[in-house]
Image (cartoon, rainbow, N blue to C red):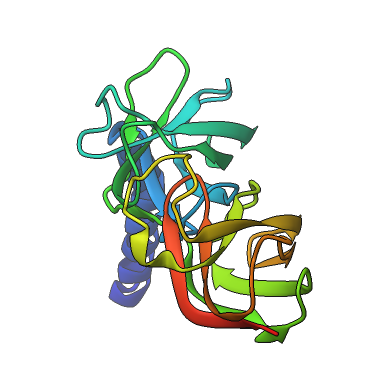
Amino acid sequence: MSLRALTILAAAACAALLAAVLPARAQDAGPAIDSVDANTITIGDVVTITGHGFGAKKGKVVTSAGIVKAPAQDRWKVREWSDTRVVALFKKVHRELREGTRSLAVVPKGAEPVPYLGSLQVSGPIGGGVSPTTVAPRGEFSVFAKCLGSKKGKILVGDASSLLPGAGAKLPPGLTKAKVLVWDSFSVQAKLSKKLGPGLHDVVIVNSIATNVIEDALTVE
């Protein structure tokens, strides 16, 4: 057999050996998360997590501020589960947590958490605009923003200067509550309260994570 033929056979043998060894080494390395299809999330978002070693039986997904085993953890609902793919709904923020950076982990049934080496940002409403910008008393209007979430929140209209972070459920003075007609992840349709007088008003978006003020956004004739 020629030297060239021997070289080709040796190369083929090495390739076959690597093909057999590398998957085994990847498996020996243990479960891991390879990717998460979102960087910023809010209530109602569905996230897909891919990796390996999650197991066939449904486990859970956890997010927390800091270590993955922290007692304050957000609530997720697992929709799909396989050894290499998990799809989960971000359902509720823990009462001690709000906006901010989260550690994420997949927790296989009966096993230790599989941490994600990256992180997620949990966000309330971002930005915002109103259309139309001038309406009649008790008129309807739409509000547009990112990260509204799928769970219905509140739309407040009036003077937001007295609004304080973490003020709670009590309606701040100077603001009236609009009636929410439609609420989805990117827009809200609402109707003004009869208590709201004419003039230029702020519009406040409130969801279960945070509050966002759109200043001087709406004029009532």
Say left or right for 153 vs 122. Answer: right
Residue 112 percent location from the top left of the image: 32, 21
Q: Could one spot residue 136 in this view of the protein? A: yes
Vertical placement of residue 88 versus 202, above or below:
above
Q: Nearer the viewer, residue 138 or 187?
A: 138
**Nearest the camera: 16 or 186?**
186
Front residue of 136 and 217: 136
Nearest the viewer among 167 and 101 is: 167
Q: Does 193 appear above or below 33?
A: below
Q: Is residue 8 above or below residue 90?
A: below
At 37% from the left edge and 70% from the top edge, which residue is drawn?
8
Quarter of the picture holding the C terminus: bottom right
Tell which residue pokes out farthest to the left in this image: 66
Q: Position of residue 99 (x, y in %)?
A: 34, 51
Q: Residue 18's x, y, as percent? A: 34, 52
Q: Residue at x 58, y 51 (%)?
A: 45
Which of the 4 quarters of the picture holds residue 134?
Answer: bottom right
Quarter containing the N terminus: bottom left
Compared with residue 160, is residue 88 higher up or lower down, i.e. above or below?
above
| Count of residue discs | 0
Residue at image location 42% in from the left, 66% down from the top = 160
Q: Please give the name of the residue rendered at 64% of the width and 66% of the height, measured from the top-left corner.
A: 196
Say which quarter of the image contains residue 155.
bottom right
Residue 53 image offset from top left, x and y in percent: 44, 32
Q: Position of 51 compared to 200: left or right? A: left
On screen, residue 107 versus residue 45, left or right, reads left
From this viewpoint, is residue 81 visible? no
